[in-house]
Amino acid sequence: MYIVTTCLRPTDDVLSRAHTHATEYKMKFVDRRKLSIDELKKRHQRDVLVFDKRRVEFTPLHSTEPFFFHPSSSVFRVKQLSRGGSDPLIDAMQATPGDHILDCTLGLGSDSIVMSHVAGSNGKVIGLESQFITAQLVREGMSVWVEKDEQVNEAMRRIEVVHSNSLDYLKTCAENSFDCIYFDPMFEKTISESVHLNPLRTIADTSPLTQELITEATRVAKKRIVLKAHFESDTFERYGFAHIKRKTSKFHYGYIDLESKSI
């Protein structure tokens, strides 16, 4: 549970978004009244969610570091693709315009933004996030964050963020309902290397991949299942992924090609 408040000088739109969020998720809305975040935490003994014009910040009760959505590496990755360059995830996925893609480990959404850019306005990207607060922050953040590159903004706005466990969600999907399915179970290691994501360390979902998850993904995907994992991981071999080795990166990609039924 957390309280919902606003920046010190909220616009009508910010107030409306904050009230709507508090009502929808049955959280307490608190008028900021020029109080600091520390003062609000002391008074209410709760985590604090702050709505601002360009972002939404979450500060845990026992932390001084706020966490907020940021498009991060997706900005230069989209720019690189726009200039005719390549992206290792897109290469592994062989994603094309119009694809329907399911990101089973959304996290901060950086990979989903790149996928959404490639899938385009005729495609679809759904990002699953099992942690409630992360899902809320990313959903709200993607709706208001503004980058100079309009292509990034458009890609963010198109993403559908769903608060759900990936296995539960996959079980509700029809066969062959997505072109590509993506897993990044290494999200907890990714955030450990980013200082501004420290507050997320305690709530990141560290659930490992399972055979049941792969089986469901194989039923739901049409083209490819793609996995991101540490280069030393045995996950690629264990679940039958073709391992794409990257000499300059700690993280590698692997894929299961469902169209050819071969690996």
Image (cartoon, grey):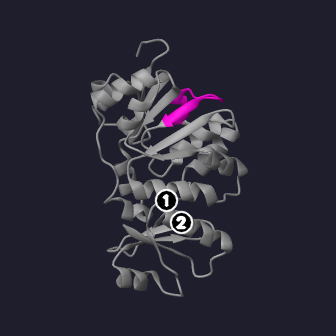
Q: Is residue 253 above or below residue 143?
A: above
* Residue ID at (54%, 29%): 91
**Location of residue 198 in the rendering, given as x and y in whole percent from the top left corner:** 37, 63
Instruction: Return the disc, 2 or 1, that comes first in the chain's sequence.
Output: 2
- Picture quadrant of residue 8: bottom right
* Residue ID at (52%, 82%): 32
Q: Amino acid at mark 2?
A: Val
Query: Residue 137 — which label?
Result: 1
Q: Is residue 18 magenta?
A: no
Q: Which residue is mark 2?
A: 56
Q: Amino acid at mark 1?
A: Leu
Calculate the distance from the C-alpha at mark 2 to the C-alpha at mark 1: 6 Å
**Location of residue 37 in the rendering, given as x and y in whole percent from the top left corner:** 45, 80
**Stretch in magenta:** 88-102
Q: Is residue 135 above or below residue 14?
A: above
Q: Is residue 98 magenta?
A: yes
Query: Relative to the observer, which residue lies in front, 198 or 172?
Result: 172
> Answer yes or no: do the residues labelled 2 and 1 have beta carbons within 8 Å?
yes
* Residue ID at (69%, 37%): 121
Which quadrant is home to the N terminus?
A: bottom left
Q: How many marks?
A: 2
